[in-house]
């Protein structure tokens, strides 16, 4: 049975984090799971526990404290004109996560071609932000009930750099926090960028329900199989 490690606060890493225990003796891949705003690194532990046995699962804590055991990647206000973000905080978290993932890869001998970043809600937003601006750092990303920030456009990688990336967009049709139109926009945007991706919608609200979880894990497993094929990107 998987359990969570104590919180690691190590100056060698840009963020505090937990890992799922026991970790693989020699991890073949890295999965970084990002919680949503007002959550914490424990939230996606059950999802990570379903990843492959040779996957190192890391759950970082957002750098912004919002309350007792409540953290975020940036502050946001939900208004009649849509979400209004603190763009400087989103940018700082994007840069910090890119550094953090690189530090994990170096520490555990895992390359970018075997690394996935994924998250729920705001965590999904940051997953896309990392992958679409630094595709050399990860092989794939998943946005679970999140969106792609319009503010990200000036920093997007060019088409040749994005060509090896794959994405996953999952969203509830009845989401009252981030309307499903955000997922539809994200899918159109990824088409325009030439990013290979899958989009799935569910009869649910702003939640990570059983069907969404199962489909994400199936998508993740297909990536594992692809990496293990002869001739896969190394």
Image (cartoon, rainbow, N blue to C red):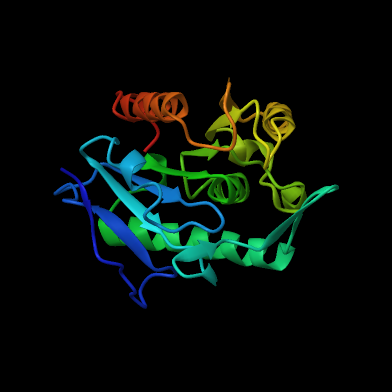
How many numbered circles does the render carry? 0
Q: Residue at x 56, y 30 (%)?
A: 170
Tell me if residue 14 comes above or below residue 114 in the rendering.
Answer: below
Residue 214: % across, % down: 39, 25
Q: Residue at x 23, y 60 (%)?
A: 5
Residue 76: % across, % down: 69, 59
Q: Residue at x 63, y 62 (%)?
A: 74
Q: Is residue 28 left or right of residue 187?
A: left
Which residue is at the far bottom?
A: 11
Tell which of 139 and 31 is nearer to you: 31
Q: Is residue 219 left or right of residue 185?
A: left
Q: Residue 204's quadrant in the figure?
A: top right
Tell which of 8 and 106 is nearer to you: 8
Q: Is residue 1 visible?
A: yes
Q: Residue at x 66, y 41 (%)?
A: 147
Tell me if residue 204 comes above or below residue 234 in the rendering.
Answer: above
Tell me if residue 35 comes above or below residue 48 in the rendering.
Answer: below
The C terminus lies in quadrant: top left
The N terminus lies in quadrant: top left
Residue 56: % across, % down: 27, 48
Q: Is residue 64 visible?
A: no
Tell me if residue 232 comes above or below residue 76 in the rendering.
Answer: above
Tell which of 197 and 18 is nearer to you: 18
């Amino acid at each position: 049975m998987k359990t969570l490690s104590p919180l690691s606060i190590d100056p060698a890493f840009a963020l505090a984090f937990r890992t799922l225990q026991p970790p693989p003796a020699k991890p073949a891949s890295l999965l970084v799971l990002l919680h949503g705003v007002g959550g914490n690194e424990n939230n996606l532990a059950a999802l990570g526990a379903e990843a492959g046995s040779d996957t190192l699962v890391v759950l970082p804590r957002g750098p912004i404290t919002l309350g007792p055991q409540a953290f975020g990647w940036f502050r946001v206000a939900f208004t009649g004109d849509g979400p209004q973000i603190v763009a400087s905080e989103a940018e700082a978290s994007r840069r910090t996560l890119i550094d953090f993932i690189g530090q994990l890869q170096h520490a555990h001998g895992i390359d970018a071609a075997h690394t996935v970043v994924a998250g729920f809600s705001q965590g999904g937003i940051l997953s896309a932000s990392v992958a679409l601006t630094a595709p050399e750092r990860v092989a794939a990303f998943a946005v679970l009930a999140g969106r792609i920030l319009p503010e990200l456009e000036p920093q997007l990688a060019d088409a040749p750099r994005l060509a090896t990336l794959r994405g996953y967009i999952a969203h509830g049709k009845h989401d009252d926090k981030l309307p499903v139109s955000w997922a539809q926009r994200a899918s159109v945007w990824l088409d325009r960028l030439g990013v290979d991706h899958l989009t799935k919608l569910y009869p649910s609200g702003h939640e990570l329900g059983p069907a969404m979880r199962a489909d994400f894990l199936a998508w993740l497993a297909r990536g594992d199989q692809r990496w293990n094929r002869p001739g896969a990107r190394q």
